Image: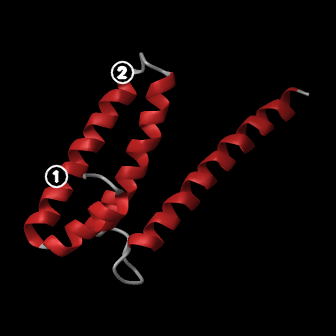
């Protein structure tokens, strides 16, 4: 009986990780610039935006989770730096990704 509870818990964790991976793959497919692209600025910004949205929802229910809040601030700063790099180098792609992700007005 005890082993079945542990196995069910492990399966739940594995399933949760699989759904997050599938979501990440969908984001990569949507924002990639070529077939093998998984690390361009556009993809990184989109993935960070999804993670920021997820953590924001988490922090609405867990107001005292300061470790996650620190991670959120780090991700927001990383996204800001990537956006400024993209704006400096290719303004067209910057405007396109801002419009797609609805980041600014």
Q: Which mark is residue 72?
A: none
Instruction: Kindly identify which residue carries mark 1.
Output: 81
Q: Which residue corresponds to the image point at 29% horizontal and 43% vertical from the top-left?
A: 75
Height in image: 20 above or below 93? above
Q: Nearer the viewer, residue 98 or 26?
A: 98
Q: Residues within 10 Å of mark 1 (few under 14, many from 20)?
A: few
Q: Quadrant of residue 7?
A: top right
Q: Is residue 8 left or right of residue 46?
A: right
Quadrant containing the N terminus is top right
Q: Is residue 27 left or right of residue 38?
A: right
Q: Tag 2 or tag 1, which sits nearer the N-term?
A: 2
Q: Residue furthest right?
A: 1
Q: Residue furthest bottom?
A: 35
Instruction: Kindly identify which residue carries mark 2.
Output: 66
Secondary structure type for disc 2? helix
Q: Residue furthest top?
A: 64
In the rendered image, residue 50, in percent from the top left (x then y), is placed at: 43, 51
Q: Which residue corresponds to the image point at 42% horizontal and 46% vertical from the top-left?
A: 51
Q: Which residue corresponds to the image point at 34% horizontal and 28% vertical from the top-left?
A: 69
Q: Is residue 47 left or right of residue 3?
A: left
In the rendered image, residue 77, in percent from the top left (x then y), is placed at: 21, 43
In the rendered image, residue 32, in percent from the top left (x then y), is placed at: 38, 75
Height in image: 3 above or below 75? above
Height in image: 84 above or below 71? below
Q: Which residue corresponds to the image point at 44% horizontal and 68% vertical from the top-left?
A: 28
In the rendered image, residue 17, in percent from the top left (x then y), is placed at: 60, 49
């Amino acid at each position: 009986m005890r082993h079945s509870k542990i196995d069910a818990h492990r399966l739940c964790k594995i399933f949760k990780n699989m759904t997050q991976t599938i979501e990440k793959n969908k984001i990569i497919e949507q924002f990639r610039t070529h077939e093998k692209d998984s690390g361009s600025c556009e993809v990184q910004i989109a993935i960070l935006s999804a993670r920021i949205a997820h953590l924001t929802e988490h922090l609405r229910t867990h107001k005292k989770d300061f470790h996650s809040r620190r991670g959120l601030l780090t991700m927001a700063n990383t996204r800001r730096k990537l956006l400024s790099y993209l704006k400096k180098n290719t303004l067209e792609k910057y405007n396109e990704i801002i419009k797609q992700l609805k980041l600014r007005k």
